[in-house]
Amino acid sequence: MAIMSLSSKPISRSAGRSAVAAAAYRSAEKLTDERTGQIHDYRNKNGVVATACSVGNQRVDRETLWNAAEAAEKRKDGRTAREWLLALPSELSPRDRQQLAAEFAKMLHQKYGVATDICIHEPSRTGDDRNHHAHLMATTRIVTIENGKPVFGAKATFELENRERQRRGLPSTMQEMKGIRREWADMVNHALELAGSTERIDHRSHADRGLDEAPSRHLGPAATAIERKTNQPSELRLKHRAERMAAFQEKLAARRAVKAARDEQRKAKDEAYIAKSVARGLDIAASRNDRLTAMLHNEAQRARDNSISAMQRAAASATRAASLSQRLSELADEEGDDPQTAARKAFQRAKIQGDMLREAAQQAAEAFMRRLSKPTDGQIEYAERRTKLIAQVAVDQSTTIADREAEARQRQAERKTQWAAERAEKRQQNNEQWQSVKDFFGIDDQHTQQNDNHQKQKRKNDKPRQP
């Protein structure tokens, strides 16, 4: 996976270092230090993929540049160069990695006016096969080209002390470094997006991202060399591991203390909640008791009211029965029948009248339905207009659909033409970018083909990594 790794450190005489020696080692070349007369020959060193020493877009001789950088510094503890170590994503192709390193070098030149020396290294045979990285050495002074030779000027703004930067209205060195890390992360993520990879990197620290993980620490070349020779962890790694363990124990103890405090707080809240719930339960019980008493009183009142209304209904029924009995007695006296016969005749007359009313209602309903089933002239005219309108809408819709299909085919053809033009333009831009990278690193087509064949053979011979 792609990792965020960008570090910077000065090359200073106070540490016994030389910019010429560092450049010779990183580029695997033979360079002569004119200040000391020492010859640094690292031509037998392997793993250097591509190198480029330039001032902006102008190539310069590596030995001339770094000897001039050494001559420009007069102090015995002067800084002669600054090294940037860049982790290049293994998800990118060799061409994309070279283009990414060249883009970072151009950014440094445009921002600070310094000369840059890029050396891209491939992973070592005994190390991690994803460890593609670049060593970029930059001058500490502004460099211009006059008559084909580098001329050193004032110190670059990145090398100024914070006091001088504050006087000039510039941010601190730490803030400047954060800005460079942000620009590098944007460059890498853009390159990964163009390559079709879903990997992304983040320039922010674990603390800024809200992560509790301890950041990894770089061991350096000496400790790494010891581990490769002995196949045992170095003292520096063990020290880092012990420091991480101590920090983890402190963090764990702090977490436990916070958890205990939260548990006590939660326990107090639970007890307060229980007491509040008990008081609320008592209030609810008292309220329910009051409601139950009121309910019993209402039920008793309702029972009394129902009994009174029942008595009233019974009295009314008795009154209606007495009135009906008196009416039947009157009918019986008029026709000379007994009360039972009079009641039976009255029922038969009511039944005959109900049947007659039901038959009349049925005849009226049949006549109404016949009137509804017979269409009027207005209904016939409305049906004809509706049929014509539906036919016209169908014709219009068929014409509209055909026009829309023709327009869709035309738009599709236009889009295909536009996509083809965009692909051709993008292909031309990629070819121009790759040509600029080849010119920047001094790579010819034969060297590119040999490098591609070498990478294919290496991938074929390498064994898959164990999970």
Image: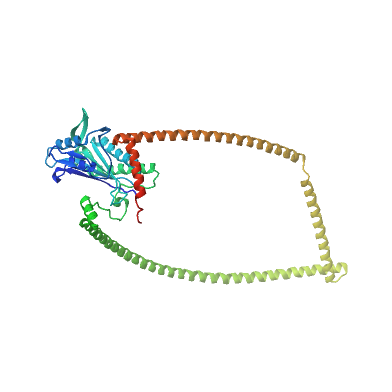
Colour approach in the figure:
rainbow
Q: Residue at x 41, y 35 (%)?
A: 427
In the rendering, at what x and y percent does residue 174 appear?
23, 45
In the rendering, at what x and y percent does residue 348 appear?
83, 65
Q: Residue furthest right?
A: 336
Tell me: residue 378, above or below residue 208: above
Determine which quarter of the picture holds residue 49: top left
- Taking depth in this image into account, of 230 and 11 the one nearest to the observer is 230
Tell me: residue 43, above or below residue 228: above
Q: Residue at x 59, y 34 (%)?
A: 403
**Which of the image's four quarters has the C terminus?**
bottom left
413 relative to 180 in the view: left or right: right
- Taking depth in this image into account, of 450 and 389 the one nearest to the observer is 450
- Taking depth in this image into account, of 82 and 125 the one nearest to the observer is 125
Determine which quarter of the picture holds residue 265: bottom left
In the rendering, at what x and y percent does residue 87 appear?
29, 46
Q: Residue at x 58, y 36 (%)?
A: 405
In the rendering, at what x and y percent does residue 10 appear?
19, 43
20 relative to 379 in the view: left or right: left
How many numbered circles does the render carry? 0
Tell me: residue 71, above or below residue 367: above
Q: Is residue 166 visible?
A: no
122 relative to 348 in the view: left or right: left
Determine which quarter of the picture holds residue 19: top left
Q: Is residue 340 visible?
A: yes
Q: Residue at x 33, y 44 (%)?
A: 454
